[in-house]
């Protein structure tokens, strides 16, 4: 009853899952973002320079008490980096593991931010009908030379499916082997677990790398404010650390980090700066 009075209870959704409580939404989301459009002086003019945006097609995240969290790709962590990359002159292609629609955490959508909403509506068809990673891998990365980077957005949906998908592992291995940029924010680095040898069939390539990512200790606190309906059953940071990766931040803040051609960020608070950093780094190297 007290949790109900304080607005701490996760909210049931029409499909049997739960979205964050009213309190959690007030604490962690906003109707507007800090997106700022940049006129990049060295804007890319080559239409064949593209960024592959790897989204999750999964929406329901099981928790330890059996309740499911209504998740997907976090809209701010997906759209703001894409907006900066487009501002920098890069074409954007949406992919999901099998070509099913990319799932979006609509409860986190900044609906009063007109620029973000216009961009979302512009790309909604591509999000609803993305390309397939499985097909891309099967066809031996046809036209792959056009891609200069892979962007893996955050949202808890990134820990559903992507870490155990062998085709995702092959895609990221390919990008790493080809010295392409790999860009990821918040929970997105959970997809790096698809690089585990038992999933991808190859040795883990990021041992010794450092990243910014959403901290496990913060994930463990989210059920307390009703953001999650229960504890997660596993924590991606712990697993990445076992593979020799270091997470540089301890808070869900605006940290952005570059280690070689791996560019990462900690949370939605970093999305605008992360997008600018990615655009600047790609433009400096093409």
Image: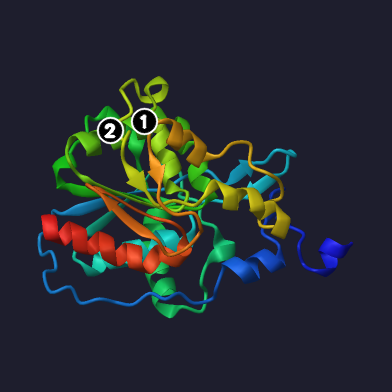
Q: Is residue 19 left or right of residue 185?
A: right
Residue that numbered label 1 is attached to: 195
Whether the residues at callouts 2 and 1 have beta carbons within 8 Å, the answer is: yes
**Front-most of residues 95 and 254:** 254
Residue found at x 71% / y 46%: 230
Instruction: Please provide percent x and percent y for residue 105.
Output: 54, 58
* Cα–Cα span, label 2 and label 1: 7 Å
Label 2 Cα neighbours within 10 Å, binned few <14 / some 14-19 / many ≥20: many
Quadrant of the frame with the N terminus: bottom right
Measured along the vertical axis of the image, is residue 198 above or below residue 144?
Answer: above
Residue found at x 71% / y 62%: 21
Q: Is residue 74 visible?
A: yes
Q: Is residue 271 left or right of residue 69?
A: left
Q: Is residue 77 left or right of residue 65?
A: left
Residue found at x 52% / y 67%: 109
Residue found at x 20% / y 53%: 50
Q: Is residue 35 left or right of residue 91?
A: right
Instruction: Please provide percent x and percent y for residue 91.
Output: 22, 58
Secondary structure of residue under mark 1: helix
């Amino acid at each position: 009853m007290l949790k109900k009075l304080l607005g701490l209870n996760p909210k049931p959704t029409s499909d049997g899952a739960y979205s964050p409580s009213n309190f959690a939404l007030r604490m962690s989301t906003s109707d507007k973002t800090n997106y700022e459009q940049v006129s990049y002086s060295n804007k890319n003019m080559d239409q064949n320079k593209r960024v592959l945006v790897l989204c999750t097609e999964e929406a329901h995240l099981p928790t330890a008490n059996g309740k499911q969290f209504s998740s997907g790709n976090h809209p701010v962590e997906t759209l703001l980096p894409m907006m900066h990359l487009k501002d920098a002159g890069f074409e954007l292609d949406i992919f999901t593991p099998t070509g099913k629609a990319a799932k979006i955490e609509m409860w986190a959508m900044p609906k009063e931010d007109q620029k973000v909403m216009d961009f979302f509506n512009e790309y909604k068809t591509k999000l609803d009908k993305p390309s397939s990673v499985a097909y891309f891998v099967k066809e031996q990365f046809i036209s792959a030379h056009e891609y200069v980077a892979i962007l893996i957005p955050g949202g808890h949906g990134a820990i559903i499916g992507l870490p155990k998908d062998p085709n995702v592992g092959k895609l990221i291995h390919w990008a790493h082997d080809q010295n392409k940029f790999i860009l990821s924010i918040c929970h997105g680095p959970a997809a790096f677990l698809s690089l585990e040898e038992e999933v991808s069939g190859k040795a883990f390539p990021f041992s010794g790398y450092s990243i910014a990512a959403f901290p496990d200790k913060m994930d463990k606190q989210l059920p307390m404010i009703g953001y999650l309906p229960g504890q997660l059953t596993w924590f991606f940071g712990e697993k990445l650390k076992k593979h020799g990766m270091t997470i540089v931040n301890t808070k869900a803040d605006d940290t952005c980090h570059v280690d070689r051609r791996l560019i990462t960020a900690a949370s939605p608070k970093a999305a605008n700066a992360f997008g600018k950093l990615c655009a600047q780094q790609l433009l400096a190297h093409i």
